[in-house]
Image: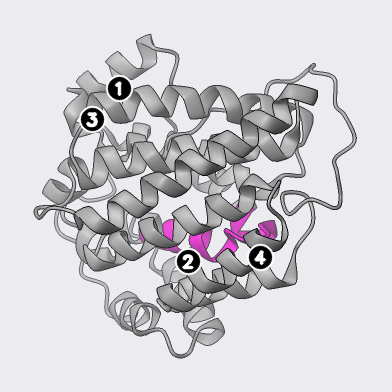
Amino acid sequence: MLRHSYFLALLLLLSPIPGFAREAPDFGSPSFSTVPELSVGFDLLYEQKFAEAREGFTNWESRNPQQPFGEVAVAASYLFEELSRQGVLTSDFFLNEKKFLHGIDASPDPERMSHFRDALARARELAAERQKTNPNDGEALLALTLAAGMESDAESILQKKHLAGLKHMKKANGYAKELLAQHPDATDAYIAPGIANYIIGSQGAGSRFVLRFDGIHGDKKLGMEQVARTAENGRYLRPFAKIILALAARRENQNALAQKLFRELSEQYPDSALFASEYAKAMSPSVPPGQGR
């Protein structure tokens, strides 16, 4: 049953845990303040200019060698490039029940995935160094959350190693709970519980039972509301949250919301063929029977 949950790669956590002591965030870090150079890099990523984005991330990382977020961004550039190559972040993928539940049909590019894993390893090493002096370091926790989530993403969506994806999802779950308990203003992280709730809520009864037994619950409506928090206030993942929310809206036959979000994305990134194409599809929606119900 777990094999049907390929999006476990993205299930990072459920909800922030109330009652934890909060420490003041480091506003000099990229996790809790917007770094213009990183924002430019992520914009290039959403424009599918992967090499240019990667060059910007690498340049920033070379000047900030103790910040794990630079390596996280480099890893994201490789993963996003492969997801784009495989057509994952499209309505053709989301509205195809077989692909949505099982993952891609082809195989990922081995060289690209090797670079992706190397960047993840470096990000984890840098995060571990920061935790030697402060185990609750927010910058480290965000890096570890995103690293585990992206690795789960790669294993489940691209390689169909669903049990391995679940293992890394559990790690990300723990890191993200701790992060958001201390730093609820780490707005990019709020996409994680939303995706978790939506995807688990979309699974069959058997998969939901197994995942609920492991402490993971699903609520599609709540999930979309949580993703919307990042879509409204995210620093670097705001456009990504809009993509996910718009595709979920297509599945739920919420066409007006999907049209609004894809229109905003196409206006923000006019050179992106992806957003132009998805906006056109949203304006003429055709949802296969049984989707989003």
CB under 8 Å between discs 3 and 4: no
CB under 8 Å between discs 1 and 4: no
Label 3 or label 4, whichever comes before in sequence order: 4
The circle on residue 60 is 4
Tell me which segment is drawn in magenta: 230-247
198 shown above or below 274: above
Q: Main secondary structure of the magenta part?
A: helix
The answer to whether residue 217 is seen in the rendering is no
The circle on residue 208 is 1
Q: Residue furthest top?
A: 213
What SS does tag 2 mark? Answer: helix
Q: How far across and how far down the image is residue 208, in percent?
A: 30, 22
The circle on residue 162 is 3
Label 2 or label 3, whichever comes before in sequence order: 3
The circle on residue 257 is 2
CB under 8 Å between discs 1 and 2: no
- CA separation in Å, label 3 and label 4: 34 Å
The answer to whether residue 192 is seen in the rendering is yes
44 magenta-colored: no
Q: Marks 4 and 2: which is nearer the front?
A: 4
Label 1 or label 4, whichever comes before in sequence order: 4
Of the 4 image quadrants, the one containing the C terminus is top left
Q: How far across and how far down the image is residue 49, in percent?
A: 43, 79
Q: Residue at x 30, y 59 (%)?
A: 83
Label 1 or label 2, whichever comes before in sequence order: 1
- CA separation in Å, label 2 and label 3: 31 Å
- How many other residues sit within 10 Å of disc 4, few (<14), some (14-19) or many (≥20)? many
**Which is nearer the eye, 292 or 266?**
266
**Which is nearer the eye, 166 or 95?**
166
